[in-house]
Image: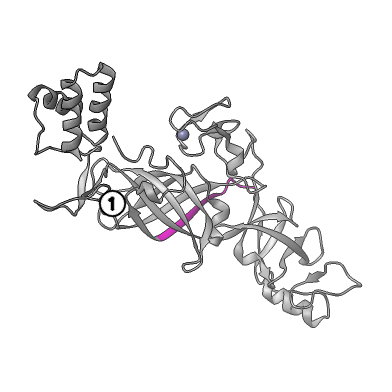
Amino acid sequence: MLIKSQVELFESIKSGDTEGIIHGAEEKLMQYGLTKEQVKRIRESRKPDLYITLRAPIGGVVIKKNAILGQFVKEGQEMFVINDLSHVWVKLDAYERNMPWIRYGQNVTFTTAAVPGKTYGGKIIFVDPVLNMNTRTVNVRVDAANPEFELKPHMFVNAVIQVEVDNAGNVINSDWVGKYICPFHPNEVSSVPGICPESKQPLQPASAYGYSEASHPKLPLVIPETAVLYTGTRSLVYVDVPNQNQPTYEQREVTLGPKTGDGYVIYRGLEEGENVVIKGNFQIDSSVQILGEPSMMNPFQPETKGSAYSSKPTPETTSVPRAAHREKREETNSVIQKPAPEMSPDPHASHGTGGR
Ligand SMILES: [Zn+2]
């Protein structure tokens, strides 16, 4: 094919074709992967070159070599697979309970046993819209720089995402309040709507990806997980009733938000500053059950709405804080894999990951 195209070029020169037609023949050779210099040399030498050096379109390392000397290759046949490993994709597995914390564009840090003591960083560029039925996890793809080439394809990593959420469950990123981001390059951030210069995609408001819009977001209420009695359908806490002659506790049904490392975000049912029982709540609950009052296991007591109960051994309580809650989400069993553009669902997901 290459030789035939070379002959075509010489014939069109010989027959005195216009520069346009000659240029077309040259263009065809370049489409086959020849460089401008090679075409120029062929044109000057006036005879077809039987041995042609084909240059790889990208720099990198050969990770697969199918070609052997003297082999006949057909059009479209894969001879070499070349990877640019200066950028890698990290594939993370996130459990369902992690999902409230995970957003497109978040920073991720990760470590690998192969390079002890070193922490790497990257950004989430894709969150799979579908959960993997076999692993019960959601694939989260991170783009990470690998300038030292220490990260090798198929290595395992452990990744951590530090997250802060507001009281509506939106992720707080003060840099992105009111900003617009590219749906494919989270590094492309603008204060006005527009088009990403790289992907030519319209920029989207950061809030569309679940980021808080408020410049002073309201922080959520967080209580320790031991405060929550979970019945399977309802979540109960016992709240300290203040100004009583003896310790008195009131049962409260709460709506739980995302699970934090050792607590829960509370969407409804508690006020800031209230004291919740964090130790001894099971004891209170079983006592009210004996008294025939509504309890964890026996909620439907029409005559009373919530019950106050006096307890002798003072249970340990804690105040409900409205605290900035920095959450750590850890994914394990994650694999580093080099970007494989043909696998990507979007046309330019290999952007910034290869070809430089
Ligand atoms: Zn873009």
Residue 232: quadrant of the picture: bottom right
Say if residue 141 shows up in the picture: yes
Residue 28 belongs to the span the image colors magenta: no
Image coords of residue 189 (percent x, y): 50, 30
Q: Which residues are magenta?
A: 322-332
Element type where label 1 sits in the image: loop
Residue situated in front as seen by the camera: 175 or 305: 175
- Single out the residue that lies furthest toward the front: 15
Q: What colour scheme was applied to this rendering of the protein?
A: one colour
- Single out the residue that lies furthest toward the right: 303
Identity of the residue drawn at 39% across and 48% down: 109
Identity of the residue drawn at 83% across and 67% down: 306
Residue 28: quadrant of the picture: top left
Identity of the residue drawn at 52% across and 61% down: 131
Residue 284 placement, left or right of 25: right
- Per the picture, the main secondary structure of the magenta-coloured stretch is strand
Residue situated in front as seen by the camera: 234 or 225: 234
Q: How many marks?
A: 1
Say if residue 55 shows up in the picture: no
The answer to whether 308 is drawn above or below residue 73 in the figure is: below
The three-letter code of the residue at mark 1 reads Gly
Residue situated in front as seen by the camera: 75 or 342: 75
